[in-house]
């Protein structure tokens, strides 16, 4: 993600807020399986959902169905 931030065109505060909300404030996992395993180990497999992040190219967990 650092590369993306350094090489982006225009600075957009809405995008910066989205990055903070959907990426930087969350743990990142290299694979979807790793993210699902963490959710399962924490007893949250039925509550948390995975999504692929366009900013860091990793996987995150969210409560929102995507």
Image: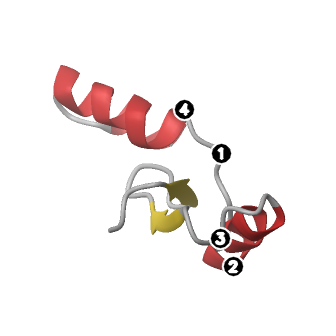
Q: Identify the residue under disc 4.
A: 25
Q: Position of residue 37 (x, y in %)?
A: 76, 72
Identified at 65% across, 45% down, the residue is: 27
| 3 or 4: tag closer to the N-terminus | 4
Q: Against 12, is 65 above or below?
A: below
Within 10 Å of disc 2 (Cα), the crowding (few <14, some 14-19, many 20+) is few
Work out whether residue 42 can be spotted. yes
Q: Which mark is residue 27?
A: 1
| Element class at badge 4 | loop
Front residue of 24/66: it is 66
Q: How far from the left and from the top, in percent, is residue 45?
A: 65, 70
Q: Residue at x 20, y 34 (%)?
A: 9
Task: Give the residue number, with chain letter if any, for mark 2.
Answer: 33
Q: Which mark is residue 36?
A: none
Marks 2 and 1, Cα distance to the nearest angstrom? 14 Å
Q: Earlier in the sequence, mark 2 or mark 3?
A: 2
Residue nearest the observer in this picture, 57 or 29: 29
């Amino acid at each position: 993600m650092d590369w993306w931030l350094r090489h982006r065109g225009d600075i957009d505060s809405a995008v910066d807020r989205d990055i903070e909300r959907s990426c930087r404030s969350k743990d990142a996992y290299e694979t979807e399986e790793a993210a699902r395993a963490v959710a399962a180990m924490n007893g949250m497999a039925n509550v948390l959902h995975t999504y692929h992040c366009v900013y860091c190219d990793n996987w995150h967990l969210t409560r929102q169905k995507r």
